[in-house]
Image (spheres, coloured by chain):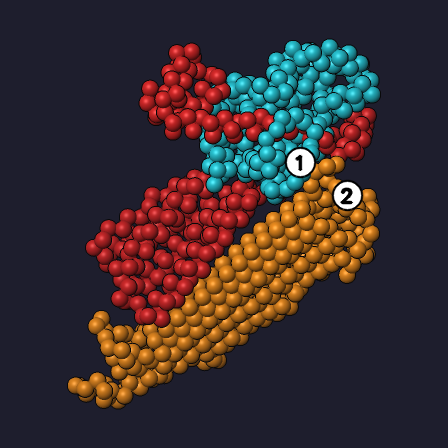
Chain colours: A orange, B red, C cyan
Amino acid sequence: MKTLRPFLAGVLLVSAAAWGGEVADSCDAAPDGLVRVKNVAGSVHVQGWDSNQVSVKGILGEDVERLEFVCTDKLVRIEVIIPKHHGRRIESDLTVSIPKGSSLKLETVSAEARVEGVGGAVTVSTVSGGLAIQDAAGPVEAQSISGDVSVSGDAPSVTAKSTSGKVTVSGGIGQVRGESVSGSMGISGTMKRVEANTISGDIKMAGAADQVKLETVSGKVSVDRVLEQAEASTVSGSIDMTGDRLSAAEFSTASGDVDFTGDLAEKGILKVSTQSGGIKIRISEQTAARYDASTLSGAIKNEFGPTPQRANEHGPGLKLQFGPPEATASVRLESASGGISIERR
Amino acid sequence: MRCIKARARLNDYVDGLLAESDAAAVAQHLGECGDCRSEEEALRRILQQAHELPREIAPPRELWDRIANKISGHEEAALTRPRSASRARLLAKMAMVVLFLMVISAGLAVRMSRNTSRDVSAPAIGYGDCEEALQKCAQARAALLADLDGHKAKLSPKTLTMVNDNLRVIDKAITDIKNALKGDPENDRLKGLLVHTSAKQVQFLAEIARLVNHA
Amino acid sequence: MGLAAVERHLMVDGKACTASADDALVARARAGDASAFEQLYQKYAGRIYGLCVRLTRSPVVAEDVTQEVFVQAWRKLSDYRGESAFPSWLHRIAVNAVLGVQRAQRRRDFRLAALGWLRGRGGTSSGGDPALRLDLDAEISRLPDSARNVLVLHDVEGYRHEEIAGMLGIAPGTCKASLHHARRKLRKELEK
């Protein structure tokens, strides 16, 4: 198929200001090939469509050299070329339509990026532009430094990283991996496994995940709900977790408070330890578990009846051990100076 | 005998472990030197207090019952169970950090050599314990910051602010972890977290450096 | 020389005047007399527990270790031939048990920092400001395992370098270096 050239192409233009900069081009493409798009500034909108063609339409900034559009068998490359010494008007807005079975690799610096309905693997990276990936169906990798990242869809895996931007992931996803320094992380929907790691960003999960593994230094962790296994650790951040009948749960902080509402499956193990953070757990009466709670200088409250004993005769520390001997589940709560409260759900 | 020698022998002197001639020499110096005398007194004070610490502390009453049960039933006494593989996790984490540092510094060396006149040598990486990993991080951090400084002009003010803000966030996190470690120095999780967070800072700086050199 | 030092010498040297009373109890315990063993427990549990608390930094872990020490002692009574005083023998079992725990220890330990629990404890304090002692125990608990082991065994419990080296499986030179380092660290923290 012939490529359409901007009709001014044959004419030598002296004044860049006169360059309208409109582009339109397209070529045949494999239904499941790879499409690479690079645009430094402006915006890029990529959408999956039913046609076995890649088409690009847009407006190039006045200081842009040209749009490179190269089609080979399984690879289509679209790049906004900026001359080495360029002016400031390099913002270009592109709309790219690709076969919906394609994989996509999209790179921008400050351009906003939006991807919709692309079914193959999607990899997007930016520095400060925002990233929005919708209707994801294949594995997604999205990375930004200060731009916000948002991914939604039903995908086998989503990896979303940002340094200071917000990260939002939603949908029915197999494995979610989120990473940020100061950006907050919001995950919602139905996930098999969620792993999130931030330095100061809050981590918030709503919906249902089979397993979660969440780490932060000072961010707040809040989860509603986790179904099977939960691991959360912070230094000063608080942990607020709601769970189902968990087979394993482990929460540790140094000074963050831990608040857990949930139950344990048979042989389930719940371990919470803090240095100075308070520990509060709400478990239903029906969960038969052996409890082992100890603090050095905090108080221990227990709505199930048994009261704590001194850990040793004249020394500091309280400990509380109770529960039916035949119980297979176990709850272990330790804090140095935080208080422990065991409550009936 | 001079102060340096006397101080080096002070502990053994106070413990009565020096040979007679050495002890006499130290004693003589102490008689003449007020500073060393203060040192000696301070050391003796600490030792005195340590000697006077109560060594007998009554365990809880029911401990004997537990022992009696065990010796009559000859059950296997179970000591505190080792926690699940936290050391293995720490080592795995550190291996990851070191691997990643290798990748970053390799990539870095390539980019740096392409663009800057300044010699930014990638630190030699090896597997080691926390101290080593932290040192590598510190070296990489210093090198990257220096390089970044030279290219500051290339970054927009907004980006510069963002970079500084995030560096501050990570610095604060490192301080928080170190403080938590002060209260719990043997905590493997916190140690691993310290290394991981330091490495994160290096990673962040490396990304910025890559951008800067790309532009 | 305070009473503590005298006691220490007695225990470590194995020439304790309490030894003869122990001999009888040990003989009976070895023959299976649990009440004799209980008397030995009543006599020495405090010392063992105190050592364990300082070394493990956790009253709860120390309980477990103390229990383990006496259970092991009961089982190995036939091996004990009186070459050292009974409490010294117990001490060695305790140090080994603590080392094992320190190696395996994975859960959070408790700090003994700034808590009044050492006030009014039994033992042989011959003066000195109680507040100072609290801080000292807190700082000792902050030392890393190896430094703390050596400092407690040498300066609190009164063992000699060669003995400590043997118990901990390190060279006497290393033992000395650890001790001097630990003392320096304590001084630094306490003189702030």
> Residue A182 placed where, x, y %?
47, 63
* Residue type of the residue flagged with mark 1: Arg
Question: What kind of element bears circle 1?
Answer: loop
Residue C31 can be seen, yes or no: yes
Q: Is residue C187 above or below residue B157?
A: above
Q: Is residue A161 left or right of residue C104?
A: left
Say if B170 sits above or below B86 in the image: below
Residue A20 horizontal side relative to residue B13, left or right = left
Whether residue B151 is situated above or below residue C131 in the rendered picture: below
Measured from the top left, where is residue B92 in percent x and y?
A: 50, 45
Q: Could you tell me which chain the residue with mark 1 belongs to?
A: C
Are tags 2 and 1 found on a single chain?
no
Q: Which labelled disc corresponds to residue C119?
A: 1
In this orientation, which residue lies closer to the viewer: A69 or C57? C57
Dividing the picture into quarters, in which one does residue C116 lie? top right
Q: Residue at x 55, y 53 (%)?
A: A235
Give the residue number, with chain letter if any, for mark 2: A309
Q: Residue at x 77, y 61 (%)?
A: A345
The chain ID associated with circle 2 is A
Position of residue C47 relative to residue A325, above or below, is above
Q: Position of residue C168 (x, y in %)?
A: 55, 24
Question: Pointers 2 and 1 in contact (CB under 8 A)?
Answer: no
> Is residue C158 left or right of C171 when viewed as pictured?
right
Q: CA distance from mark 2 to mark 1?
A: 20 Å
